[in-house]
Image (tube, rainbow, N blue to C red):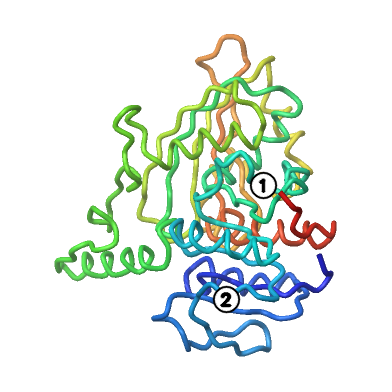
Amino acid sequence: MSSCPNIAVVGATGAVGVEFLRLIESRKFAFGSLRLLASPRSSGKTMICGSQSLTVEALDDKSFENVDIAFFSAGGSVSKQFAPIAARCGCVVIDNSSAFRMDPNVPLVIPEINPEAAILHRGIIANPNCSTIIALLPLWPLHKHNRIRRIIASTYQAASGGGAAAMQELLDATQAYLNGSEHKPTVLPHPYAFNLFSHNAAIDLTTLYNEEELKMMRETHKIFNAPEIRISATCVRVPVLRAHCEALNVEFTDPISPAQVHAWLKNQPGVRVIDDAERNYFPMPRDASGQDDVLVGRIRQDMSDPSNSSIAMFVSGDQLLKGAALNGIQIAELLVKRGLGVVAA
């Protein structure tokens, strides 16, 4: 891997694609060339990255010639079709969709947790689900000190998780509601303004968990390499424009205290503790939006556990940043630092 790789962004015009471009500039990610790729309807559009004005190209089978790293954020069907093509061209794909996350031959990477997994890539590296990343970043240092036995997660997921179209639908629905007019949802299945509803992912009719909940459960097992952890999740879409929140109830192997949690999180990269009980000030999406760190607070003993082995906490993180584009950029930085190009299968 060159220290100045040629890169491409697939899905460049979407909400996450825009964040990729912003991060490439703000983090001074050095590149030789940058190619913006999207569907034919976006072809010809002009976008800015730093001082460069770039024209969006239509994605096709030849888009990855002479590309070293490609950031994919255009949905699972696009990834399934084009990621293998890119890998065969010698390009390393960092895929933000769910297409390859549970493939045993594809590493699922959060750089602060399992950077060594990236070494094993065969041309494709998966970015975890946004809710998984936001939960696991603060849980990992705790798990290292005191093994986690069980996680109960309840998520409060913003419109940003549904992309730019869902964010616009929330704005339009809210404006219509305030004007006293009707707004028919077209992106999400239910009215969004001043409402919340079960996450719009499909329900698995065998388990009755939805796909978002199952992703959190399965991806945690893979990233932590701990299939024995018992996990249950309830994922809810809330009328917040950007940044997800999660209530986490975590049972550990041994007794644990809030003071220990504070100490173990104090210097954890990517985590910032916001836990001011006197002012009743804790993580909020308005504070997490636009921030790289996952905010953690409401750290307290679970009084229902007489063994004192359980902790409750509340976290918030920007779904478009650490939940998506930032994690992908950090994976690319790791590849460049370690010179990890495509490894033959």
Question: Viewed as shown, does residue 112 lie left or right of 194?
Answer: right
Amino acid of disc 2? Lys
Q: Name the residue under label 2.
A: 62
The residue at 57%/26% (across/down) is 250
Q: Name the residue under label 1.
A: 109
Give residue 132's position: percent from left, percent from top. 55, 42
Q: Quadrant of the N terminus?
A: bottom right
Q: In which quarter of the image is residue 315?
A: top right
Q: Quadrant of residue 203?
A: top left
Question: Viewed as shown, does residue 230 lie left or right of 157?
Answer: right
Give neighbour class at mark 2: few <14, some 14-19, many 20+ (Cα, 10 Å): few
Give neighbour class at mark 1: few <14, some 14-19, many 20+ (Cα, 10 Å): many
Regarding mark 1 in the picture, which secondary structure is present there?
loop
Give residue 58's position: percent from left, percent from top. 48, 80
> What label does residue 13 carry, if any?
none
Question: Viewed as shown, does residue 114 lie left or right of 84?
Answer: right
Q: Nearer the viewer, mark 2 or mark 1?
A: 2
Regarding mark 2 in the picture, which secondary structure is present there?
loop
Residue 241 against residue 109 in the figure, above or below: below
Give residue 336's position: percent from left, percent from top. 80, 63
Amino acid of disc 1? Val
Front in this rendered view, residue 70 or 316:
70
Front in this rendered view, residue 333 or 236:
333
Question: Nearer the N terminus, badge 2 or badge 1?
Answer: 2
Front in this rendered view, residue 181 or 337:
337
Whether the residues at callouts 2 and 1 have beta carbons within 8 Å, the answer is: no
